[in-house]
Structures are given as structure tokens and as C-alpha cells.
Amino acid sequence: MDALVKTGPEKGLVLKRMPVPEPGLAEVRIKIHKTAICGTDLHIYNWDAWSRENIKPPLIVGHEYVGEIDALGAGVTAYRPGQIVSGEGHIVCGHCRNCRAGNGQWCKSTQGVGVNRDGAFAQYIVIPAANVIPINPGIDEEVVAFFDAFGNAAHTALMFDVVGEDVLIAGAGPIGIMAAAIARKNGARSVVVTDVNDYRLELSKTMGATRTVNILRERLEDIFTERRMVEGFDVGMEMSGSTAALKSMIANMRNGGRIALLGIQQPGADLDWNQIIFKGLCIQGVYGRRMYETWYKMMTMVEGGLDLRPLITHRLHYTQFEEGFAAMNSGKAGKVILDWQAERSPV
């Protein structure tokens, strides 16, 4: 089979032939239809500091995908060949305290698909049957291809009640943009998205942001009157991983505000903890998706009219992966879809 492989400790990926994996006990094999490039894939492609610490080549990368079940391992009875599915990208131990309590997203022994084991940027992938996510009929496969990232956005955006609230989202990457769409879908009064990238700020407007702020040109405080805000934002969602953005968010929250923290901060990030204390802020770390409740919420929101298709900016054949990663590196891209079925590049 064809696969995109991190072959060594250097920038880039290699398209090469690899053996088709066989499903073992309680596993399924999925024939990949479409995949989406994630920010994690971009880190691996660029071979940055995080990748050098966490990735052990050779490795087939990728964890955002949709496909059909192709083969069943021994003991699998809940699924059938031809069934359209995606997969939860975190493979957990199943027996630690968190797993037994239904909080698998906090499993200490998590193995990430496309990070710690071979991933989905290939014509076939094998995963445990327990990680299979059956997809309801009628949902656009291009959208399902990035359900994994949508799950991060949904987990963060649904962490706190947003009905009637003023929401601040720091970071207009695809996950931040989807979080804006979810917050509006679920009743937020206003959704303000901040970033330094005008292209992505404009894209966030098409997905539901009521106001965008390029922090290189505007101050958040200056929009309070315009947004009819008195004390500050009610709910914050930090998606950027920028310490400056998090500090600004904390400063612009109302007393008693709540922050869902998904963006990974750099070592040595310094915060004004006394401000957090005196304002009575609640800060909740967010990782992955709730297994598997977030997936249910994702599908029902899409079936209920949440349209994520405007976020797709590039549709490419998998052999054009270099073009896809170049678009991601440029900052002028939303979601990049790679087609693993078409014989040539989609028009």
C-alpha cells in the first residue's frame, strides 16, 4: 500500500510502499477514503522540537480520517465490512482508574494514532475495534475526515455553558474556528476571535465569529462598548498556545469567568496567578475528546445543521501532499483534505 512515512529525523515525509497491515484479535482494518492534515502532522513534517522529543521514525503519520471497514479481526462482531467509520485517535489501556471511570481521555498510558503508532496517511489502517466510530448515514465524508480535530474543538467549546454568554477565543486555527461555530450554534451572544493572521480571521467570520480582533492592530478592551460588555468575557477558550494571548484573556475576563485551556503552553510560561485568584477564575485543561460522548455530540450538531464545509480550503490527491503541507505552513489554509481513492487530483 501507499503511505506517507516519517522515515528519519529530518524535515518532510516520504511517500513509499508499505505492507498492508493485518487486523489481530479485537481489531479492524479500515480502507482509507479521505484524510485531513492536522497541526500535529505539521509539527511532525517540520520536525520541530516537540517532534524530536516525541516521534520515533519510521512512522506512518496521520490521525484524521474516514474510510470503510475492510477486514475484521478475531472476536469482532459489532461491525461489518463496508461500514463507513472514523476512529478515536487515542488508544487507552482500559484498566486504569480514569479508564474505568469513563474518563479515557485522561488515561496515563495513551498511545496516539500517527504519533506513537502507525497512523492513517495510508491506504489502510488497523485500530482496536473499541476505537471505531460508526458514522451516521448522510454526513459528508470530507467533514468526517477532520472529525478528530472537530472533537478537540467540541470538547473545548462545550466545557462550559455558553448560552447567552460573551465568548473569547484566542487562536484562529481550524480548531479555534470550529469552536467559534460551535459556540454560536449553542447560543453564545457574541463570539470574539483573536489572532495575528488576517486570512484565518476572515475565515472565522464565515464560520460564526461575531467579531475578530487582529491583536497587532487592536486592543480587546476597545471593543467592550461595541459588544455591550460591562465587566469582560464570560467564557474563554485558549487555542493558540501563546502565553501573551493567555495573559490577555485572563486580563479581559469578568470576575468569576471560566477558561477552557487547549493550547499547549511553552516551557517557562509565566502567568499572573494572583489575578486568577482575585478574579475567581476557573481554568480547565482540555485534552482530546471525551470518549466517546464528544463524538455523539459532534455528529448530532452536524446533523442539526452545523456546517463545517466552509472550513475546507484545499482538496488534493494524496500524491500532492507536499502542496498540502506547504499550504498549512503558509498560514493561508483551513482544513486540507487528501483523497486516497481518486486516481488523480480532484477538480
Image (tube, rainbow, N blue to C red):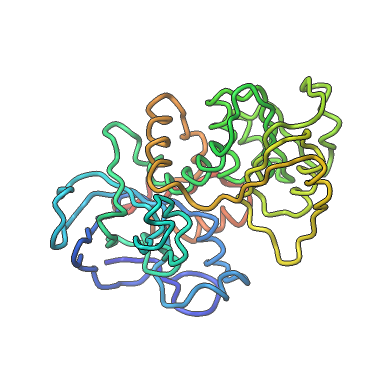
Quadrant (top left, top right, bottom left, bottom right) of the C terminus: top left
Residue 201 position, x and y percent, is 67, 38
Front-most of residues 58 and 85: 85
Residue drawn at x 25%, y 56% as measured from the top left: 129
Say if 238 sits above or below 50 in the image.
above
Residue 38 position, x and y percent, is 50, 54
Find residue 235 and report its image quarter: top right
Front-most of residues 69 and 330: 69
Find residue 32 and report its image quarter: bottom left
Front-most of residues 191 and 103: 103
Q: Is residue 342 visible?
A: no
Residue drawn at x 70%, y 63% as measured from the top left: 266
Say if 205 sits above or below 331 in the image.
above
Q: Is residue 226 visible?
A: yes
Quadrant (top left, top right, bottom left, bottom right) of the N terminus: bottom left
Q: Is residue 88 left or right of residue 48?
A: left
Residue drawn at x 79%, y 46% as measured from the top left: 277
Residue 211 position, x and y percent, is 71, 29
Q: Is residue 294 left or right of residue 18?
A: right
Residue 242 position, x and y percent, is 72, 54
Residue drawn at x 59%, y 34% as measured from the top left: 180
How many marks on residues? 0
Say if 24 sits above or below 8 in the image.
above
Q: Pick out the residue farthest to the bottom.
A: 8
Find residue 199 and report its image quarter: top right
Say if 122 sits above or below 153 in the image.
below
Front-most of residues 110 and 57: 110
